Image (cartoon, helix red, strand yellow):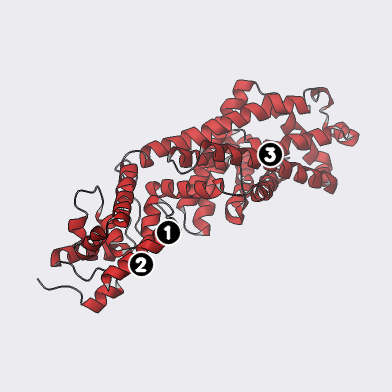
Amino acid sequence: MAMQYGEEQRATKGLPINVTVEEEQEIVGVVEATEEGEEEPVPDISWPVAGDGWFRAPKEIAAEVVKISETKSRLCILSMLMLGMLAGVYVGFGAELCTMVTHDLSQHLGIGFTRFLGGSVFSVGLVLVILAGSELFTGNCLILMGVLSGKVTINAMLRNWCFVYFANFAGSLLLVSIVYHSGLWEIGNFGVSGAALATAVEKVNLSFTEAFCRGIGCNWLVCLAVWLAVAGKDSISKILGIYFPIMAFVAVGFEHSIANMFFVPMGLLLKGNSVVLTASGLTEVLGDLTWLNFLTRNLVPVTLGNIVGGAFFVGGIYYLVYLRGGSTMSEKAVMEVLERAAQYNQFIAELTEHGSKALEGYDLSSQEKAALISGDIQWIEKRVGSLTETQKTWLNCRLQQERW
């Protein structure tokens, strides 16, 4: 059997020059499959995934979330604070829009459909967070995947959570002040302010267990929205991925700690306005609407529930399914090859001259073998995470040196 490609064509495709016919056929098949955009097979437990490149398979999403977690954990404090404030404002926009749209809707369309529409418009908050770029505490609960994968330290995760959480609170309070002084709560003959007060009162009268469980359900869905946004490779896919889980959590009535940083403080400000109290008719039930009750009866239990729902029920479970075991072994095998090649010149020569033979005994897929033989740094980083600049420089120089 003759070689499929000449020496010049093999160089163009990034293939080793000195290979056997059998080795060329194996590598060419992998390279061509990669060029055509075919997805790596996913576990049998997943639904079939299209190979058109429009969205990522679940295993790829898990790997991408870990990479994002690394980036988030390395943010400087100023970036976390600024981006965190933006996220608080963005979620507040969704909360205010939800109040404005639904304040008098139930008497016309019923409670169920009103909740559906409220959830639909509230989703604009996370769309802005993801597409515009910001740091949201509830979504950042997925950083736990980076910790479990060994890419992020626990201290780095907690550092991010703390700074982002309080920055979200600051951003929410900023928007509360802007909206209050805008006078928009007077719309509908003070109907908007009455709805805002009623929402705040309801939230501070939950029991600890109710608030905690509603927090779990909320961030389970919010982190699934983030998960689906990561799956999408274009803006429309991301928006659709965000919309349905967010609509669901609002319509069901779950509790989001950052959204509550807008809803309840807005109610507390309106409570001090005598005109609003007279118009709302809620004077007799406002005794429990205090800052202390907000913190102890709502914010603390809801925040704890958000952590459980997002970090453990989404991040933890998907780590166990897609990253623990097989993926870790594959990553170790790739790193072993890189480390061995860095230490032994003879091995790098064997890798470029007789790639398949040199990689015998390593638990590697055909794609991984092709990437190592051809020096595809971008593909290798997708598999094992970011390489150091030293590793990149060495890999480029050594492979090119051996080829020529």
Looking at the picture, which amino acid does disc 3 mark? Phe
Q: Are marks 1 and 2 in contact (CB under 8 Å)?
A: no
**Residue 108, image x and y in percent?**
69, 40
Circle nearer the viewer, 3 or 2: 2
Q: Is residue 220 above or below residue 404?
A: above
The Cα–Cα distance between marks 3 and 2, rounded to whole angstroms, is: 46 Å
Amino acid identity at mark 1: Thr
Decide: is 224 above or below 342. Answer: above
Residue 120: percent from left, percent from top = 60, 46
Mark 1 nearby-residue class (10 Å; few <14, some 14–19, many ≥20): few
In this rendered view, identify the residue nearer to me: 277 or 301.
301
Identify the residue at the far left of this view: 1
Side of 308 where 102 appears, left or right: right
Callout 3–callout 2 Cβ contact below 8 Å:
no
Q: Is 20 in front, or is 103?
A: 20
Question: In the image shown, does 324 or 360 lie closer to the viewer?
Answer: 360
- The residue located at (52%, 58%) in the rendering is 236
Report x, y in % for residue 203: 69, 29
- What is the number of the mark on residue 397? 2
Mark 3 sits on what residue?
A: 166
Q: Quadrant of residue 192?
A: top right
Percent of width and height locating residue 190: 83, 40
Quadrant where the C terminus is found in the figure: bottom left
Contact, mark 1 vs mark 3 (Cβ under 8 Å):
no
Establish if 285 lies above or below 241: above
Q: Answer with left or right where residue 43 lies relative to residue 4.
A: right
Label annotation for residue 390: 1
Q: Earlier in the sequence, mark 3 or mark 2?
A: 3
